[in-house]
Every structure is written in C-alpha cells, then in structure tokens.
Image: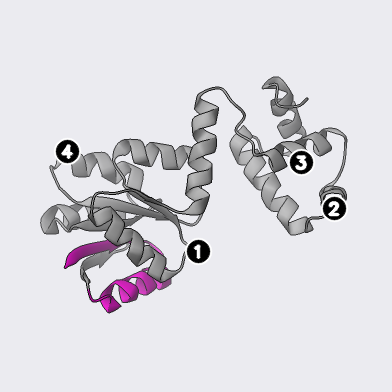
Amino acid sequence: MTTVFVADDHPIYLDGICAAVTAAADLELVGRCEDGVTALARIVELAPDVAVLDLKMPGMGALDLLPRLGAAGVPTRVLVLSAYTDGEAVYELLEAGALGYLAKDEPRDRVCDAIRVVARGDTSLGQAAQTEIALELRRRRGGSPLSDREAEIVALLAEGHSAPDIARQLVLGTSTVKTHLRNIYAKLEVDNRAAAVAEAMRRGLLR
C-alpha cells in the first residue's frame, strides 16, 4: 500500500484527486490540505510515500517545499501538478528533487499511475512536460527555446501578419495560434508581439 498526501489550493480539484486516490486499491490517502505551510508540517509529521503538490499554493509552492522537505530528512517522493507546463519550472523542480510533473488536465487515473511510478523512485513526466524540458535543455545549451511551429509564427509576426492571418496561412484555428503566441511570449520573456519579434531578432532566432 502506497501512502499519499495531497496539497492543492483549488478545492474542487483537490477533491477529485483525493477521490481518485481513495478509490485505488493500492493507494492510501493519509492527508490533504490547501496551502504550502500546512503541507510542509503535515508531510514532515506523516512521512507519506508520495506527496502530490500543486506547483503554486498560498504560503509556499512545490519549488519552495522541496528543499525544506530535504532538509527535514523526509523520505517522501514528490509529484507536482500544475495548471500549466513551463520548461524552466519543470527543470528547476526536477533539479530540486521532484520525481514527477503532470499538467492538471491529465485524467485522474493517469495521476494515480504517476503516483505509483514516483513511489518506486522512477520519474513520471506528462507529454507536455517532456517536450518543455527538452526545449529548456536546448535553451540552457544556447539553442532556440522555440518549437519549429513557434519559430514559424514569430517569422510571420515579423512580416506584420495578425493572428487570424497566421491561422489562415498555417491552416490552424485562431485560438491555437493565440495559444502559441502565449507560449512564445513566456519563452522569450516578453508580453507583446513587437517585443517577441525584437527579442527573437536579438537572439538570432529569425532567419
């Protein structure tokens, strides 16, 4: 039986994960909470096999909790859940000792499977996290942080095309293009199209 503690500041999502863990014959829910400070105290007290932690919570998030758990000598292994997937965050969490990272839109049974994998001491990353960590590693080696599609979109932005124009040219939905734009802004650390083009040029990402 694998003991599990869950911490998430979204009550409905927390209820769903706890229900999935409780329903699994080989998993035992030993505690839950909605903030990082309580999570730290309870995990140190209970020493569960696996802690399922939200990336960002009141008080402290998963990245703040990990070194504190290590300093306390707690053997608990950590699976992180997040509403979004960011390569830098995944990299830093893995470096800090987390063994898993999943987006919150993953099915509940996938989360339970990840708990089992992490409990064995193995790594479990969602598909989006795998892609983002690969991009982050490339970025840290000096390569482009952008996917081929994102680079294509930035090139079209540089030519003055709007999101609907880009969607038509690439045969994509406008909402899909806007999602790519949000990812591009995050990766280039900018907040608008003009800045994205300027930063891409500065980094030599536009051919």
Image mark for residue 164: 2
Magenta stretch holds residue 145: no
Where does residue 195 sit, x and y in percent of width and height?
Answer: 72, 32
Residue type, label 1: Asp
Q: Earlier in the sequence, mark 3 or mark 2?
A: 3
The residue tagged 3 is 153
Q: CA distance from mark 4 to mark 1?
A: 31 Å
Judging by the rendered image, the residue that carries numbered circle 4 is: 71
Mark 3 and mark 1: span between their CA atoms? 26 Å
155 lies left or right of 97: right
**Point 28% across, 51% down: residue:** 78
Q: Residues within 10 Å of mark 3 (few under 14, many from 20)?
A: many
Q: Mark 3 or mark 1, which has the lower sequence index?
A: 1
Give how far apart the Cα atoms at labels 3 and 2 are: 12 Å
- Can the viewer see residue 61? no
Residues drawn in magenta: 1-25
The residue beneath circle 1 is 105
118 relative position to 75: left or right? right
Residue type marked 2? Pro
The answer to whether mark 1 and mark 2 are in CB contact below 8 A is no
Q: Position of residue 122 (x, y in %)?
A: 29, 49
Indicate the secondary structure of the residue bearing disc 3.
Answer: helix
Look at discs 4 and 1 and give the one toward the viewer.
1
Q: Is residue 20 visible?
A: yes
